[in-house]
Image: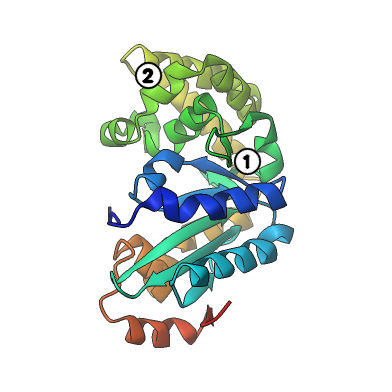
Amino acid sequence: MHSFTVDAATLWLPLLKRLTERLPSWGLWKNADTALSGQGDFDSTAPVEDWSTITAEFRRWAFENGLGPVAICREVSGVLFLLAVDRERHVALELDVNARKYFRAWTMFTPADLRPVMEIDPRGFRRVRPGAEGIILLVQNGLRWGGRPDVEGLRRKEVRRFLASDPEGVRLASHLFGSADEALRAAAAAVIGGGWDRRAMLTLESWALARALTRPGVIAGRLAAPRRKRRCPLLHTIFIDDRRIDDVDAWVRAVERDHDVFHSP
C-alpha cells in the first residue's frame, strides 16, 4: 500500500467536510482513519445523482491543492473512481464512490441503507459508526469463500477492534443482511472472542448467493470485473500499481483514450 509523505489529514479534510455539508447522502463507509493517516484511498458512498457534484468538488479541491490532472472511471458498475495526479510524487490520490456495494454478487448496501449507521466524525465529516464498519470489514476483508477466515485481512483491518467497540453499531448493521442477521451477529461475536464461526459464515454466504441468483446479469458483471481491472489503465493503476505512476504524461495519454480527464477545475 502506497503512503504519502504529505499531511494527508490536512490535505483531505476540507474536501470530506465539503462533501458532508453539500450532500446528505454522502459518507465514508470504511478506512477513514487509515486513509487520513496517508495510507490508501477513501471509500465513500452516494447515489448516482450526486456523482456530478462530487466530481466537481473533487476537481476543485485537486487543483486548489496543486494536483492534477483529474481522471474519472465508471467502468465498474455502481462505482465512480476519482483520481488526482500528484506529479511531484508520481502517485494518484483516490476517492471511490459506491452507489451500491456487493457481497457475493448480492447488493449488500446502497447509500440509503447506510443512513441509520452514519454519524458525524469529530473532525467534521460523515462516516459509518465503528460497529457498522466492523461488520462491513468482516464480510469484505475478513472472509474467504467457503466461510473461511482471511486471517491477514482480519488483522490488517482491525476488524475485532471495530466490532468490540460498538455493539449497537454491529446490531444495526447486521440488519442489512435480512434474515441472515442472526448468523452475522454470531460470526461477529466469535471474532470478538478471538475465534471464528464458520457455520455462521456459511449460512451468510448461502443466504447472499441465493439472492444473487435472482439477478444473473449482476453475477455476470461481477465475474467480468477482474478483466476490466486488468484492461482499463486507470483501474490497473489502482489495483495493480498501487496508484504509482512512473511516467505521468504517458499515463495521461493512455487514460484519455477512454476516460474523462480534466486539466483544469
Kindly identify the residue that appears in the image at 63 percent across and 39 percent down: 211
Residue 99 appears in the rendering: no
Give coordinates of residue 120: x percent, y percent: 61, 34
What's the residue type where badge 1 is placed? Phe
Q: In the rendered view of the protein, which quadrant contains the C terminus?
A: bottom right
Element carrying mark 1: strand
Find residue 228 and name its label: none
Q: In this view, does 264 lie to the left or right of 149?
A: right
- Vertical placement of residue 253 versus 29, above or below: below
Q: Is residue 61 left or right of residue 164?
A: right
Residue 3, quarter of the rendered image: bottom left
Find residue 191 and name its label: 2
Q: Is residue 88 left or right of residue 96?
A: left
Mark 2 closeness class: few <14, some 14–19, many ≥20 residues within 10 Å: many
Q: How is the image coloured?
A: rainbow
- Vertical placement of residue 146 versus 25, above or below: above
Q: In this figure, which residue is indicated by the disc labeled 1?
A: 109
Q: Distance between the residues labelled 1 and 2?
A: 22 Å
Give coordinates of residue 45: x percent, y percent: 60, 48
Give coordinates of residue 15: x percent, y percent: 55, 55
Residue 55 appears in the rendering: yes
Mark 1 closeness class: few <14, some 14–19, many ≥20 residues within 10 Å: some
Tell which of 120 and 220 is nearer to you.
120
Element carrying mark 2: helix
Kindly identify the residue that appears in the image at 49 percent across and 58 percent down: 95
- Vertical placement of residue 111 versus 134, above or below: below
Kindly identify the residue that appears in the image at 63 percent across and 30 percent down: 117
What's the residue type where badge 2 is placed? Val
- Vertical placement of residue 198 versus 208, above or below: above
Give coordinates of residue 141: x percent, y percent: 39, 38
